[in-house]
Image (cartoon, rainbow, N blue to C red):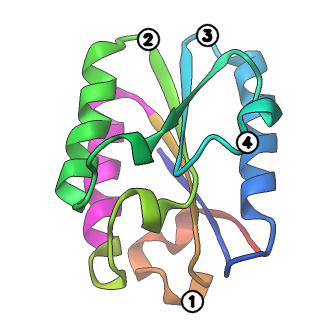
Amino acid sequence: MIQIISGVKGKGKTKYLIQKANENVKEATGNVVYLDKNIKHMFELSNRIRLINTSDYPLDTYDAFLGFVCGLISQDHDLEAMYLDSFLTISSVTDDYVGYVLSKLNDISSKFNVDFVISISMDADTLPEEFRDNIIISL
C-alpha cells in the first residue's frame, strides 16, 4: 500500500510524516525504516525507527533509488513500513516520471508486503491521476 502526503514546500509534510511514523511504530510487529535526505530529524523519530540518510549513497537516478529500496527489503524480511521524506529529492525523480516511480513502488509494496508512506512536494492536483486516491492528506 502506498499513502501520499502532498503539498508544496513548507506546509508541514515532514512534521506530519514523523508523527505518523512514531504513531505507527507503536503498533508495528515488524521493522520500520525512515528515508530522508539528511539526519536533521533523528531525535524526533522513535528509537525503534531506523533512519537512513540517503545522501550517504550514490542515488542519482530513480533506478538507483528503486534498487536501493529493493536492497533494503531484501536484507530485512521483517520490514513492515518505509517512510519516504522529500520523495522527489531522495528518489532523483522529475515530475515527468513521478507516476512511473510510484507505480514501481506500488508493485514492490504488493509483492513484498511493505507499506510506503510518501511525503511529496507536489500539489495534489499535479499528481498523476491514478495515485490521487492514495493521498491521505494534502497540505
**Mark 2 to mark 4 CA distance (whole Å):** 24 Å
Residue depicted at x 73% and y 42%: 41
For label 2, the crowd category at 10 Å Cα-Cα, with few meaning under 14, some 14 to 19 and many 20 or more, is some
Question: What segment carries the magenta color?
Answer: 99-114
Magenta segment's dominant SS is: helix
**Mark 2 to mark 3 CA distance (whole Å):** 8 Å
Q: Are marks 4 and 3 in contact (CB under 8 Å)?
A: no
In the picture of the structure, the residue carrying the numbered disc 3 is 29
Residue depicted at x 20% and y 41%: 67
Q: From the image, which quarter does the C terminus lie in?
A: bottom right
**Mark 4 to mark 1 CA distance (whole Å):** 28 Å
- In the rendered image of this protein, does residue 64 appear above or below residue 25? below
For label 3, the crowd category at 10 Å Cα-Cα, with few meaning under 14, some 14 to 19 and many 20 or more, is few
The mark closer to the camera, 2 or 4, is 4
In the picture of the structure, the residue carrying the numbered disc 2 is 78
| Amino acid bearing label 2 | Asp
Image mark for residue 41: 4
